Image (tube, rainbow, N blue to C red):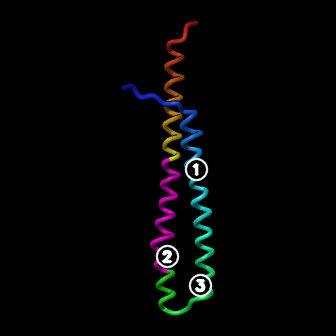
Amino acid sequence: MAFQLNSGSVRTEGVKSLLSVKEEMESNLRSLEECIEQLKGAMEGQAATSYFAEYDVIVKDIYSKLNTKVESYAEQLDSICSSFDDLDSEMSSKISVG
């Protein structure tokens, strides 16, 4: 089966959606950060310090990395669409009559 791509659909349904999810994830991370800041005002001691350090390593770090990967994936899809469009245009110009 030949590779087929509707770059317009991929951009609007795929890339746009992924970037929207990325923005939602950034908003969620900001909300999490606000919760942690509130907890910092209400907790003290070694256990609290360990808890906040664990949050930074487990939640914040992983969430940030995942968000970066979602953005990278969207950029790759957009790049594939651009390459496909360029190739399609080039092929079209080679077979155009006139």
Which residue appears at 59% of the width and 64% of the height? 28
Q: Which residue extends farthest top?
A: 98
What whole-number distance in Å separates the C-alpha atoms at marks 2 and 1?
25 Å
Q: Earlier in the sequence, mark 2 or mark 1?
A: 1
Residue type for callout 1: Leu
Residue sitting nearer the eye, 85 or 36:
36
How many numbered marks are there? Answer: 3
Quadrant location of the C terminus in the rendered image = top right
Report the residue marked by disc 2. Answer: 55
Q: Does residue 65 belong to the magenta stretch?
A: yes
Q: Does residue 58 belong to the magenta stretch?
A: yes
Residue type for callout 2: Tyr
Q: Secondary structure at mark 2?
A: helix
Report the residue marked by disc 1. Answer: 19
Residue type for callout 3: Lys
Which residue appears at 52% of the width and 28% of the height? 86
Quadrant location of the N terminus in the rendered image = top left
**Quarter of the rendering containing residue 24:** bottom right
Report the residue marked by disc 3. Answer: 40
* Residue 12 appears left or right of 76: right
Q: Earlier in the sequence, mark 3 or mark 1?
A: 1
Q: Which residues are magenta?
A: 53-73
